[in-house]
Amino acid sequence: MGINNEAGFRAWLLAQNRWSVKAQNDLVSRLKRADKIAALETTASTSQYLSMLESKPEWAAVPRASKTGMLAAARLYLSWLHQTP
């Protein structure tokens, strides 16, 4: 578990999306929280990841607003991961 190449992901957020350091920290925090529930590195798509999350009992206990933020973070990360050589 754990996100792969966090520094590279942060650099991409800064270059592609011009995210501030605070916004990057918030996004990475949500990403790590989601990764603790279901490993991001083992998924091929966002829909597959959502299915994995929904199958975990821990996911049911997460508030809706947090789920939204965690899924948005996962979408961005998986987008970056699949375009990185």
Image (cartoon, rainbow, N blue to C red):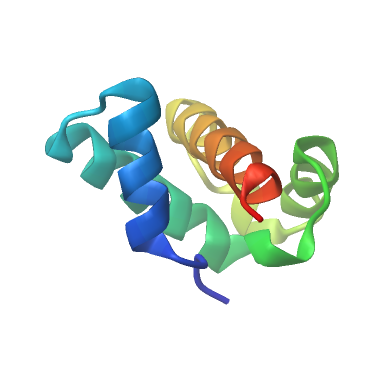
- Residues 52 and 23: in front is 23
Which residue, as the protein is rendered here, is positioned at the far bottom?
Answer: 1
Q: Nearer the viewer, residue 65 or 61?
A: 65
Q: Is residue 38 visible?
A: no
Q: Residue 58, image x and y in percent?
A: 61, 58
From the viewer's perspective, tell me whether residue 49 is left or right of residue 62.
right
Q: Is residue 8 left or right of residue 84?
A: left
Question: Residue drawn 65% across and 59% down?
Answer: 40
Q: Residue at x 85, y 45 (%)?
A: 48
- What percent of the width, then of the height, locates residue 81? 62, 50
Q: How many marks?
A: 0
Q: At 57% across and 42% down in the image, what residue appears?
A: 80
- Residue, x 61% and y 50% (percent of image)? 84
Is there any visible trace of residue 4 in the rendered image?
A: yes
Where does the image place residue 70, in percent across and percent down from the top left? 50, 39
Closest to the observer: 47 or 64?
47
Say if 2 sits above or below 8 in the image. Answer: below
- Quadrant of the snapshot with the C terminus: bottom right
Which quadrant holds residue 27? top left
Q: Position of residue 4 (x, y in %)?
A: 52, 67
Q: Quadrant of the N terminus?
A: bottom right
Query: Eyeballing the image, is 58 above or below 74?
Result: below
**Foreground: 25 or 85?**
85
